[in-house]
Amino acid sequence: MSVILVRPRASGGLAAHVDQEKHELAAAGVDVREAPVQIQDRPHLLGDLRTVRALRQCVRAAPQPVAVHAHGLRAGALSALALPRRGPVLLAVTLHNRTVGSSLVRTVGRALLQVVVSRANAILAVSPDLAQDAERAGARDVRHAVVPAPERSGGSGDSGASGDVPPGGDRAVGTAAAADAVVVARADGASTTHHGADEGTGTDTVLEVLVVARLAPQKGLHDLLDAAALLRDGAPLRIRVAGDGPLHRELAARIIHEQLPVELLGRRDDVPALLDAADLVVSAALWEGQPVWLQEALRAGRAIIATDAGGTRWVTGEAAQLVPVGDAPALASAIEHHRSSGVRRAAEAASRHRAAQLPTASDMVRQVSQVLSLDRER
């Protein structure tokens, strides 16, 4: 049996997840290949017709029997259109992102989901809301997608393993940003030396907070800055944000204007070191799939505060303190609560316990083998 992977035009967490799946399936002895298509973010009639024809040719040329695993809503819909409505070719689709935008965009998204549901043998969803959407659309076999973090090496980042849009996803890795990508917001000369966990409430030391996120609306970074403003006049605090994106200038201007205790670090290739140096990890996202960087934070044994967004709870379990999406006062209160070293130590122990329960690459291969019936073929 051969497996054809279909991916959208994306990098970051989604691309890393597809790369990992391709590598692990090949290592397991599966004949796995990638469809030679470039699926764009938005509909394009001629381009989409060419994609459907190319997918059909790819399926015909592959050793039979064939299974197709498409990642993302548009990739799934175009794959569904390319395959016979009934036939021996199995189709699994992983849904990675919510469809957001105007009412027209959301209407198109619902139509694409109906196309996927009409043909897919199984749908994997990276978050509970995506699973519910698929079930409401009539999908019969909907499963929680297994999205393991890659093995920790030199670099890491967010993922979301879940970003069909925008391209670039959320991985905060790569070369260092230009000098103007780093904004040190404390204008009062306060020390930003990391002192580590303190005894008691920690009012005499700087609380080091790390955020790894693409600087994009989905990540709730204005809510993060609102929380920083509430904490600005309290005990020393430094919030470091690793990542770049379209909101950089807007966020930087606000940080400087309001003198917020926030640094924009730009793209970094040393996120593991940043995690090791942090007292606390925070995610203010408005929506997430299964953020890979929070898996890495769990494995690093960091205390975690996150918004209860998308699939975040699937990743953190009970280890993180979850706050409502968009609630800056609740976020600020949670950060203040974690000034206590005792609170952080308990949270760090919970993170290490949760890390031992996280899915592995073997779990991912097992799930893909089940939904594509690979076990019966080998």
Image (cartoon, rainbow, N blue to C red):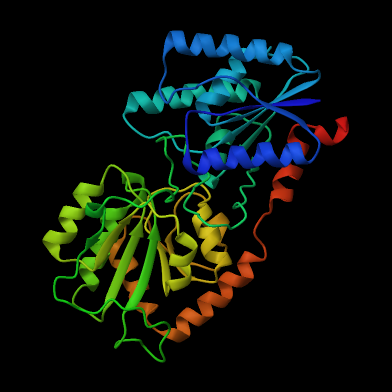
Question: What residue is rendered at 40% in x and 24% in y?
Answer: 107
Residue 261 appears in which quarter of the rendering?
A: bottom left
Q: Is residue 83 left or right of residue 374?
A: left
Question: Can you give x and y, in whole percent of width and height, for residue 143 in the image?
Answer: 66, 41
Tally the marks: 0
Q: Residue at x 67, y 36 (%)?
A: 22
**In the rendered image, the vertical position of residue 348 relative to residue 314, given as above or below:** below
Q: Position of residue 365 (x, y in %)?
A: 73, 43
Q: Residue 240: horizontal and vertical position, in percent?
A: 33, 64
- The quarter of the picture where the C terminus appears is top right
The part of the image, by quadrant, that contains residue 189 is bottom left
Query: In the picture provided, is 55 more to the left or to the right than 2?
Result: left
Q: Nearer the viewer, residue 31 or 254?
A: 31
Q: Is residue 125 visible?
A: no
On screen, residue 190 versus residue 358, left or right, reads left
Which residue in the rendered view is the most extreme toward the bottom?
A: 199
Q: Where is residue 178? Give x, y as percent.
A: 27, 50
Camera-nearest residue between 257 and 141: 257
Image quadrant in which the N terminus is located: top right
Q: Residue at x 24, y 73 (%)?
A: 231
Considering depth in this image, is 248 or 219 the residue closer to the camera?
248
Answer whether residue 296 is visible to the viewer in this image. yes
